Amino acid sequence: MTEKMLDLIIENGTVIDGTGAPRKACDVGVEGGRITLLGDLRGVPAAQRFDARDRIVAPGFIDVHTHDDQLLLEPVDGPHPKLSQGVTTVITGNCGISLAPLVMRDPPAPLSLLGDDDVWRFSRFADYLDALDDARPALNAACLVGHTTLRARHMASLDRSATRDEIARMSRDLAEALEAGAIGMLTGLYYPPARAASAQEVIDIGRPLSAARGVLTMHLRDESDAIDDALREALQIGRALAIDTVVSHHKIIGRNNHGHSTETLAMLDAASAHQSVCFDCYPYNASSTMLLPARVKQSDEVLVTWSKADPTAAGHSLFALAKARNVDPEALAASLTPAGAIYFAMSEDDVSRILAHPMSMIGSDGLAHDAQPHPRLWGTFPRVLGHYTRERRLFTLETAIHKMTALSARRFGLEGRGTIALGYCADLVVFDEQRIADHATFEHPTRVSSGIDAVIVNGEFACRDGMPVNVHAGRVIRRVGR
């Protein structure tokens, strides 16, 4: 046992290391932002000690599906939607939309979900990553390049497939972004700006991913009636590029499709025998994105989260507003755009089945700039640990933590993170497994979760009892050869 003074010892806690292994009593020693000692550390000197008696000590949670591209650049004022729920690392740029490389005024939806005109100012992906470095973000961030962003940058008309020259320019942008440190590319073929893109377009643009061993994440072209075909397309693209493929926020939309997760999960299981594939999901039976009139009839309820045409609609039921105004709900939806919405169109049985699958990782898919956001922005990870683990007993606590730590780090190539092990980065969360719970609701979506005592990012206390104490402990995680 060394006599060298450690920076921090978390003592008397029960460690769940993220691998899925059984919990064990263990102290955790931290020096220089990394885990340097594990075991009984009662005799080891430390500049600071934290008593985790009757608490779980786990790796910091990794939110694999975020739209935090701009949030990471903004100053933290008050509770943080991710730190407050134990998240220490986020994957940005999902659903085809990344903040770079694009300079544009009035970007088309869903790009506008990331913010207004002034945020679209990075002509190179490297410039965005450098800006993150300069901002010293509250969290670690690994960043994806958006296929839709590339289309908006290089195509004057988005209602067609890209030409050979446009594909070449987008592919060069992707290669430059990967060289700068991007970890992969993401698609949003579901959304209007990318709907006309063919599978071959995505493959041809994505060629640099193969040599770089980057990851491809895909918002499927359809998540309702045509989900089987959309899933087959995503798997085909992943096979053609021979890279890790992540299906984004896997879910089943529409009353007529409830229960169909049995078939989609079987398709993913069969594909996994021949290619590297997995998926993320969130623990709610309601989704949230731009307000789309075509989604209205599929849903039992639609809540407006923001509207440029009528800001007073935010937080209200679309159906209630339509009744009060004596108009058709779909017509009202069209009149409110550009806007965002929450759709209640999923089955809880499908949500539970997808969450419990061994491939599933946890991602919030929260939209930080909505006036009335989906509660998943603030409550996803405590909801998994409280509602689905402690109350529903859908899986063990060890399995739940694995889904939000080591599994995520492995799938996204985040070396040295996601596990409590010697030499790994000291991203840690200390929580009470009997008290951890989400409090964000659809009516009050920004309520802070409870039961989390401390969040440590790169060896620094970043959050205590839901309140930030260091909002500059994060780092940009750049791609390295995998």
Image: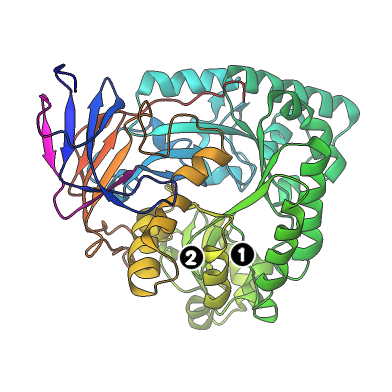
* Main secondary structure of the magenta stretch: loop
Residue 50 quadrant: top left
Depth-wise, is mark 2 or mark 1 nearer the camera?
Answer: 1
Q: Which mark is residue 309?
A: none
In percent of width and height, residue 447 lies at: 27, 59
Q: Is residue 51 magenta?
A: yes
Residue 201: image x %, image y %?
84, 38
The residue closer to the viewer here, 476 or 268, is: 268
Left or right? Give the position of 354 relative to 310: right
Residue bearing the label numbered 2: 304
Instruction: Specify whether residue 291 is painted magenta.
Output: no
Quadrant position of the N terminus in the picture:
top left
Total numbered labels placed on residues in the image: 2
Query: What residue would you read off at disc 1?
Result: 251
391 vs 359, left or right, is left
Instruction: State left or right for residue 356 relative to residue 316.
Output: right
Q: Which structural element holds mark 1? A: loop
Instruction: Name which of mark 2 and mark 1 comes first in the sequence.
Output: 1
Q: Specify the amino acid type for callout 1.
A: Lys
* Amino acid type, residue under disc 2 in the picture: Val
Within-10-Å neighbours for mark 1: few <14, some 14–19, many 20+: many
User: Residue drawn at (47%, 17%), measured in percent from left and top?
Assistant: 130
Front residue of this view, candidates 326 and 166: 166
What range of the chain is rendered magenta?
A: 42-59
